[in-house]
Image (spheres, rainbow, N blue to C red):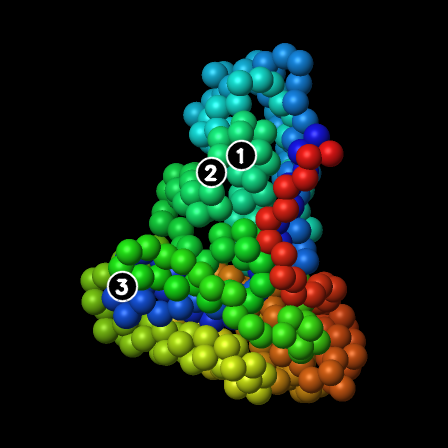
Amino acid sequence: MIKSTAPTRIDLAGGTLDIWPLYLQFGNPPTLNAAINLYATVELTPRSDRKVFVKSKDLQCQARFNSIVSLPESHSLDLILKTLKYYQPKQGLNIVTSSKAPPGSGIGGSSALNIALHGALNAFTKKGLSKKQMLEAAMNIETQVISVPTGWQDYFPPLYGGVRSVRPGFDGVDSVTLPFSLQKLSASMVLCYTGNPRRSGINNWKVMKKALDKDRAIMEKLKKIAQIAREMDKALTLGQMKKVTALFAREWEARKALAPTISTPHMDRLIAGAMKKGAQAAKVCGAGGGGCIAFMVPSRKRESVVLELVRLKGQVIPFRFVQRGLRVQVI
């Protein structure tokens, strides 16, 4: 059996600007994020025949096919099936996928699962792709599945782990590991799941179209996010926790201005309650509209903030930041 695992992530600053060609309009700003120990897992076992069995524990969905050739063009498990078609395994197999990320949480669960799937299939088929090649294939397949451009940022933490600065350039997009203490960052953050995800946060495609049409209001808001990302990159590099916390708060204000629907009334109540109990900053993860909120909290206030979030019907998720990325094991 091949077991492949990849971490999800918490985005710190610069999201939305990791989409081509948006970053080119703002001087190639970085996007900052960090891998966390809520893993996506793919278990792959070979079969003695040519049949394909796919099971998603998260979607509570499974399907059987006679062979790779018989895979349909459209299916609820589209991402997995299109990735199978890309790798073209020469024998049958069973694939079971799962993720510790709650549904619609905004912490990159689908991208982590995507990377874990590529890791397993790359090993199984001996295709020999590099990490960068797997990243590009994963991103392009996901773009085809969702039919809108995807950003780069979500694929780097699952592959490489750590605190990352995703840096676009004229000759491609890469990332570097920043030397910020994972222990310090873990001790300073609380993650809360609202349990009520819905698709009404940032619509990156609409934002992108408005920016390319030179909508002045959108351009100014994105310019602020780009500047915050540059400052966050520097603060993380220098290990300046107070500055990181202040920039985290500024990023949230800039993101709310860009898309007011990123937050729900329930999220607003959770944020207000946590701030009253001593949280220093809060930010909705991902595109928002439900899902997770990350809070910056001093250690002495952590317990009171957690108790308040639970009282307000939030689900506090234990986690820590991790250095490890994709791990593929042959068992």
Instruction: Name the spot of residue 182 as percent of width and height, x first.
Output: 64, 71
Sequence-first disc among 1 and 3: 3
Vertical placement of residue 282 versus 324, above or below? below
Question: Mark 1: which amino acid?
Answer: Asn
The residue wearing badge 1 is: 122
Q: Quadrant of residue 240?
A: bottom right
Q: Is residue 232 left or right of residue 21?
A: right
Give neighbour class at mark 3: few <14, some 14-19, many 20+ (Cα, 10 Å).
some
Sequence-first disc among 2 and 1: 1
Mark 2 and mark 1 residues within 8 Å of each other at the beta carbon: yes
Q: Is residue 304 left or right of residue 174?
A: right
- Rounded to the nearest angstrom, the CA distance separating label 3 from label 2 is 28 Å
Which of the two discs, 1 and 3, sits closer to the camera? 1
Mark 1 and mark 3 residues within 8 Å of each other at the beta carbon: no
Query: Dividing the image into 4 quarters, which one contains the C terminus?
Result: top right
Question: Mark 2: which amino acid?
Answer: Leu
The residue wearing badge 2 is: 129
- Rounded to the nearest angstrom, the CA distance separating label 1 from label 3 is 32 Å
Q: Is residue 190 left or right of residue 208?
A: right
Circle 2 SS class: loop
| Residue occupying image coordinates x 65% and y 62% | 322
Question: Mark 3: which amino acid?
Answer: Leu
| The one of 253 and 19 positioned closer to us in this rendering | 19
Per the rendering, the mark at residue 24 is 3
